[in-house]
Image: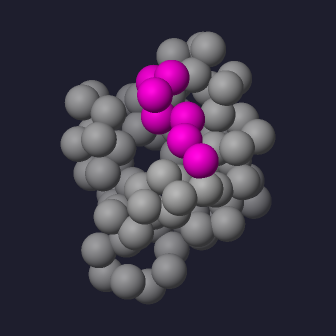
Amino acid sequence: MSEKARKLFDALDLDSDGVLTRVEVISALRTKGPTLASTGVLPFWGVGDVDASSALFDRANLDGDGVLTFEEFEREADRRFGW
């Protein structure tokens, strides 16, 4: 398990239900992104606009169910951020 992916997932899981929705990913990256980047939880270049956040979600949501489990998120975060 990637410790960085877990920290980022938990920070993005705004309602703490154990899965991420598209709205959570977009909203959390917009509001928390700069702080997460400044603390090293997210690369600075990972703080993107709505389209970039939405693309991250789509790429990670392989089963198309509209939510990301930690495993789906971890796979994409590790690939995208090189963890």
Q: Quadrant of residue 25?
A: bottom right
Residue 30 visible in the displayed image: yes
Residue 45: in magenta span:
yes
On-image quarter of the C terminus: top left
Q: Quadrant of residue 15?
A: bottom right
Front residue of this view, candidates 74 and 50? 50
> In this picture, is 80 found above or below 62?
above
Picture coordinates of residue 38, whole percent (x, y): 62, 14
At 59% from the left and 68% from the top, the residue drawn is 22
Q: How many marks?
A: 0
Picture coordinates of residue 24, whole percent (x, y): 67, 60
At 64% from the left and 34% from the top, the residue drawn is 33
Position of 58 with respect to 44 (left or right) is: left
> In this picture, is 43 found above or below 47?
above
On-image quarter of the N terminus: top left
> In this picture, is 83 found above or below 79?
above
At 24% from the left and 30% from the top, the residue drawn is 82
At 46% from the left and 28% from the top, the residue drawn is 45
The range drawn in magenta is 43-49
Coloured how? one colour
Picture coordinates of residue 56, whole percent (x, y): 42, 56
Residue 14: in magenta span:
no
Picture coordinates of residue 75, whole percent (x, y): 27, 51
Front residue of this view, candidates 1 and 61? 61
Residue 1 visible in the displayed image: no
Position of 35 with respect to 10 (left or right) is: right
